[in-house]
Image: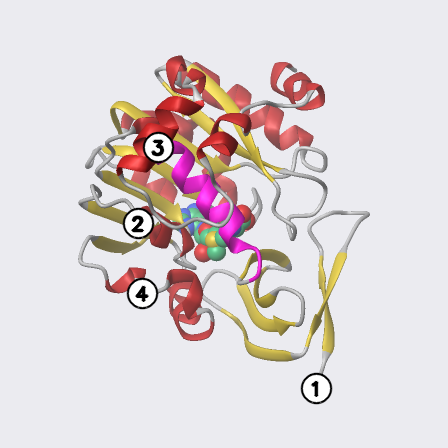
Amino acid sequence: MSAWIVEKLYESWRQTFLATKTFFEARTEHQHLVIFENPQFGRVMVLDNVIQVTTGDEFVYHEMLTHVPMLAHGHATEILVVGGGDGGILREVLKHKQVTKAVLVEIDQGVVDMSIEHMPSVSAGAYDDKRVEVVIQDGVEYMAEDGQKFDIIIIDSTDPAGPGEVLFTESFYKNCAKRLKPGGIFTCQNGVPFMQGDELTDTQNRRKPHFKDAAFYVAAVPTYVGGFMALGWATQDPAYRKQGAEVIHQRYSANPFPTRYWTPDLHVASFALPRYVQDLMEK
Ligand code: SAM
């Protein structure tokens, strides 16, 4: 029996999906989780009434949040993913042959289990890869520990509400900076700037004290409505953002892997930001 499912991320603007089949709907230990089928976007996951991932367009977000830091770095072997229980970031990270370890710190076991069961194409077997270690824990606690350092830290979290809120704080970013190896790169899901401008401004101001270079790059994810999505970027080396397409092309041709959105030229172009986003960064 079909039904309409409404995303309630914004006060005065909503999007609605036709759900032709619902595979799962329940409250997990942390969130209300729904997975349903939609004729346009395939299988769709919703957490606390906010669209998280669809099998139709997830490649955009997962490729950009993974391959931009990986190719900018050039020889990252140890990767940390916070959130990302659907397994899409893990899938993309594991495409890089030099990766020896990928740690996923996810607060909600239910998201991992239901993603594997009802959206298996997203993780595509990543959870069975021997390089993967899954830690079911609040990412803010994990980052506060004096533990392993990583080449790349990717925060694939929900929005700054509910369990995800702590992953947008200055103390969390300070700890992320501590858990990066020299030359390390931080990236994160940072909202849709046209709709969540304050989030972009606030997170930029919280990262700047702890990283020499804090900025954003963008990707057009159809189901994250309101224009392109901003992906947060933070490193101790501003040169990463100035790499030309030639460097990225060379690295990619040395170890090519299949993509449907990311390309070396788009990698470089994605750091070019419209004036209104630059203005939000400088507020
Ligand atoms: N691509 C989506 C987006 O851009 O909004 C994110 C998808 S992924 C499913 C988000 C994950 O973050 C969820 O699995 C959620 O359980 C996890 N999460 C939220 N707060 C967390 C926290 N404090 N620590 C670890 N994982 C968290």
Q: Earlier in the sequence, mark 4 or mark 3?
A: 3
Secondary structure under tag 2 reads loop
Q: CA distance from mark 2 to mark 1?
A: 39 Å
Residue position for label 3:
71
| Residue hosting label 4 | 125
Magenta region, main secondary structure:
helix
- As measured in the structure, the alpha-carbon distance from the residue carrying label 1 to the one carrying label 3 is 45 Å
Q: Provide residue 110's location: percent of width, then percent of height.
A: 42, 67
Going 44% across and 24% down the picture, which residue do you hit? 245
Mark before the other along the chain sequence, 2 or 3: 3
**Marks 4, 1: nearer the viewer:** 4
Quarter assignment of residue 126 = bottom left
The amino acid type found where label 1 is placed reads Met
Q: CA distance from mark 4 to mark 3?
A: 23 Å
Which residues lie in the magenta part? 56-71
Q: Secondary structure at mark 3?
A: helix
| Kind of residue at badge 2 | Lys
Q: Of circles 4 and 2, which is in front?
A: 2
Q: Is residue 66 magenta?
A: yes
Residue at label 2?
95
What SS does tag 1 mark? loop
Contact flag, marks 4 and 3 (Cβ < 8 Å): no
Compute the Cα span from label 4 to label 2.
Answer: 12 Å
Name the residue beneath numbered marker 1.
1
Label 1: how many Cα within 10 Å (few below 14, some 14–19, many 20+) = few
**In the picture shown, does residue 60 fall above or below 265?**
below
Residue at 80 percent of width and 49 percent of height: 13
Q: Gap in Å between the C-alphas at discs 2 and 3?
A: 12 Å
| First along the sequence among labels 1 and 3 | 1
Q: Is residue 169 visible?
A: no
Q: Earlier in the sequence, mark 4 or mark 1?
A: 1
Tell me whether the residue at label 1 lies in contact with that at label 3, contact meaning CB atoms closer than 8 angstroms: no
